[in-house]
Image (spheres, grey):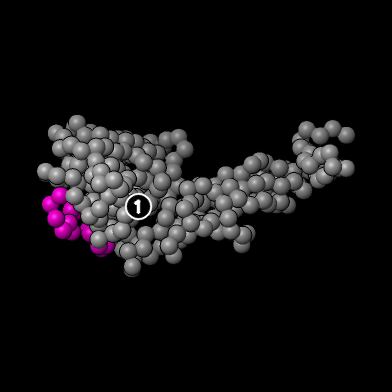
């Protein structure tokens, strides 16, 4: 089986690297779906769970009937080296795979499984470490099945091994993905401010400054890296981070409000 050679890639995703994980995956099992449409696994999110538990891998064994059921599997995948990773899904009926909040691949709709090599795939650039992983699966009528495979640097196409999967220990709690942080502007002069924003968190964002919220304003005196976590249903993510560069100098440059006419002065372009 061909392998992807070791390589770097553009904009690799940072790992979540949670603490206190154990082997396996957490799952939620459903026997209802939005609109009774078992061809769209995203409809599971709005439904009440029938049961929860954990499995060693992506197993359908906990199902309680042969049709009209679904699973949400959550946990982490341990990436051994930075590079491009390809994920494959082959299912009967629908399945979707996410790394963090990004959907990487979907085998969408109601259908049977496909011959090996014809299944849908998707690629994502990842740094080494543990990344949040979610797989949705829904089954209507007829046959059923789910296969999740991957391929990457020095890893030929294969089923994801049990020892590459982990979950949050206790209570079926899986930490959410770390929030994605941005700054505007990313470079300032001393005395200026920058707005930090967090996205991808459905709960509460907590910043290293002690503030909470999706957006805060900071005025660092020197180049500073800020971090933030996402808390959802009592589970806390790993850190997202963003750096504000404070340029040297800046003397004689003013910021603020001048007679109600000027709210901000760009020190880099302010003459005088």
Q: Nearer the viewer, residue 56 or 102?
A: 102
- The quadrant of the picture occupied by the C terminus is top right
For residue 130, side relative to residue 117 (left or right): right
Q: Which part of the image, by quadrant, shows the N terminus?
A: top left
Confirm whether the magenta stretch covers residue 59: yes
Whether residue 45 appears in this view of the structure is yes
Q: Quadrant of residue 253?
A: top right
When asked about the image quadrant of residue 85, the answer is: top left
Q: Which residue is mark 1?
A: 46
In the rendered image, residue 106, in percent from the top left (x then y), is placed at: 29, 38
Whether residue 197 sits left or right of residue 11 in the image: it is right
Residue 202: x %, y % from top left:
47, 53
Residue 80, position as x, y percentages in the image? 34, 48
Q: Looking at this view, is 134 or 63 the one in front?
A: 63
- Outermost bottom residue: 170
Q: Is residue 57 magenta?
A: yes
- Neighbours of disc 1 within 10 Å: few (<14), some (14-19), many (20+): few
- Look at the image and give the residue range highlighted in magenta: 51-67
Q: Quadrant of residue 48?
A: bottom left
Res. 151 visible in picture:
no
Q: Secondary structure at mark 1?
A: loop
Task: Name the residue rendered at 28%, 42% in the picture.
Answer: 40
Question: Which residue is pictured at 26% across the width and 37% down the height?
Answer: 108
At a point 44% along the width and 43% down the height, the residue shown is 13
* Secondary structure mostly seen in the magenta stretch: loop
The number of callouts visible is 1
**Residue 59: x %, y % from top left:** 19, 53
Residue drawn at x 43%, y 62% as measured from the top left: 233
């Amino acid at each position: 089986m061909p392998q992807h050679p070791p390589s770097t890639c553009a904009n690799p995703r940072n790992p979540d690297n949670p603490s206190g994980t154990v082997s396996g995956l957490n799952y939620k099992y459903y026997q209802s779906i939005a609109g009774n449409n078992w061809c769209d696994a995203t409809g599971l999110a709005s439904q009440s769970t029938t049961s929860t538990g954990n499995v060693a891998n992506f197993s359908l064994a906990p199902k309680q009937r042969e049709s009209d059921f679904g699973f949400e599997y959550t946990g982490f995948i341990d990436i051994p080296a930075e590079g491009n990773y390809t994920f494959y899904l082959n299912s009967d009926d629908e399945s979707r795979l996410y790394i963090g909040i990004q959907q990487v691949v979907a085998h969408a709709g109601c259908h049977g499984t496909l011959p090996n090599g014809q299944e849908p795939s998707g690629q994502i650039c990842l740094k080494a470490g543990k990344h949040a992983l979610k797989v949705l699966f829904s089954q209507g009528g007829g046959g059923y099945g789910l296969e999740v495979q991957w391929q990457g640097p020095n890893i030929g196409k294969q089923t994801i091994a049990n020892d590459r999967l982990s979950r949050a220990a206790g209570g079926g709690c899986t930490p959410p993905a770390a929030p994605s942080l941005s700054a505007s502007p990313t470079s300032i002069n001393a005395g200026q401010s920058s707005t930090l924003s967090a996205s991808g968190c459905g709960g509460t964002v907590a910043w290293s400054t002690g503030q909470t919220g999706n957006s805060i304003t900071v005025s660092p005196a020197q180049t500073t890296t800020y971090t933030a976590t996402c808390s959802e249903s009592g589970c806390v993510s790993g850190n997202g981070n963003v750096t504000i560069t404070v340029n040297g100098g800046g003397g004689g440059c003013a910021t603020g409000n001048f007679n109600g006419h000027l709210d901000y002065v760009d020190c880099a372009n302010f003459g005088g």
